[in-house]
Amino acid sequence: MKLTGIEITEEGAAAVTVERQAGVMRVTACGQVRREAISSDTVTDVDDGALLAALLGGLADRGEKGVLVLPPKEMIVRRARLPFRDTKTIDKALPFELEPTLPISLEGLHMVWESRDLGEKGTEILVFLASEEVLENRRLQLKAAGLEPLMLVPAAVAPAMTLARHAGTFLTLHRVLGACVLVVVSQGQVIFVRSLALAPGDEMACLSREVWQTLVALAEREGQWMVPEKIFADGWAHLPDHLDTPMGALALVRPQILAATGAIFDEAVKEAWVEGPFDGALAVACSALSGWRHPVLWRQGFAPAEFVGKHKGAVLFTGLLAMILLVLVTVQALVGVRQTGRDLAWVETEMATLYLDTFTEESQAPVPNLLLPAMEGRVRVAQEEATYTGENASRVRVMDILDAISTTLPGTLKVTLTRMTLAKGKLTVSGLADDFGAIDTMKGALEKSALFSGVTIASSSKESGGDRFQFKVVIDLSREEAS
């Protein structure tokens, strides 16, 4: 299979054609076109469609399909953390989590994401968004230039993941179109992407400052300092030996993308190849041929006619096997229809038993066709009751409040909590204590929790006919959700 990778740069555009045969990547052509070479006006006036047409028109060899790197200015990157792992649940919740952070409405935006499991902390999600109109325009530009679009991918991700095969934790700085894309990779996964503007004449100081801020922000979010091995930087004619960071001076090196991909040259390509300008185009072409495992802003759908034309024999054989399998399944279904009916009745009985055991206040389960919706409704109500919405519309789980109480109270404290009531931002806790000192100790411990803004002893008296002391404590919930 042969593909052409393309990256639009500040000076123009670069393309690399790669063919994969027997697992070997072979670069068959490369080329670049400068904007100033196709326009007598300023380079910013050059239309990208004309730029791509000139680039592909002068390329000695190209694939039937192409992969285009979307410039940083055409994508939005966000991070989110959610308390669940199920992909369908994340798909539903993510738009509501992101919408307040976006400069434009989600309507008309295409979104892709990848997740990282943090265990008890939930799921860390890296989100890429791009306008549907922009994506369609890029597809049309490729088609107009005579190349079938296969993928549109985020800037700098493919080079970073290519380098991740041979490095542990590192940063990449990829300069393109007057901006820089900063990528953080750890344990073979992209965990942070950010596009930042470069201050003319002071780019290295700007980069040093941004790297500092990124590492500090990651340390706060991850709960530990990340220790990158090095920083890969490309797109600059001259680079210093290192950048100052909270980890000390980190080596600043140019990435060797060609070596990382393991691709080899055709003889005709060696003279035209220059390390650096072709890195992005080479990385996306090789990644696509290797079965792209990174976020994709757009991917060509399945084309039945094209597939059948190329694999007619395999399709016929697969169709015959599918027909035989269909006959066997049909026979099995007819033979087992009675057993299926008995199994269904058993499942309905078990569901009814589960419903009555769970919701003990109910004396009779709903009819079978309404049983599942009824259970879902009851669970939804339970979930809503398990979350308290404060006056500032911040949502705090009741479980978090209980956890804060249990973790802040000393284990040796001799108090018994008998009743808790939550209303209008106040939590009233009643209980029994061995003495007044235990009540004061409990008050002092609760005041240390970030979830509570104030703790007041409303009443305390000796238990009638007993040796313990009754108390009532009123806790004011914090206006800001605890982290």
Image (spheres, rainbow, N blue to C red):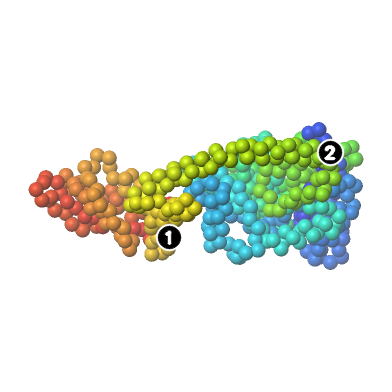
Percent x, y for residue 443?
25, 51
Residue 243 is situated, as x and y percent measured from the top left of the image, at 62, 45
Could you tell me which quadrant the N terminus lies in?
top right
Residue 64's spot in the image, x, y percent? 84, 48
Relative to 329, 430 lies left or right:
left
Please identify the residue farthest to the top as the structure is shown.
Answer: 22
Residue type, mark 1 in image? Ser
Question: Pointer 2 and pointer 1: residues touching (CB < 8 Å)?
Answer: no
Q: Which mark is residue 394?
A: 1
According to the image, label 2 marks what residue?
A: 313
| Disc 1 packing (10 Å; few <14; some 14–19; many ≥20) | few
Mark 1, secondary structure of its residue: loop
The secondary structure type at the circle numbered 2 is helix
Q: Report the side of 130 relative to 140 (left or right).
A: left
Q: Nearer the viewer, residue 403 or 324?
A: 324
* Amino acid type of the residue that numbered disc 2 sits on in the rendered structure: Gly
Residue 267 lies, with reference to residue 398, above or below; the image says above
Binning the other alpha carbons within 10 Å of mark 2 as few (below 14), some (14 to 19) or many (20 upward) gives few
Q: Nearer the viewer, mark 2 or mark 1?
A: 2
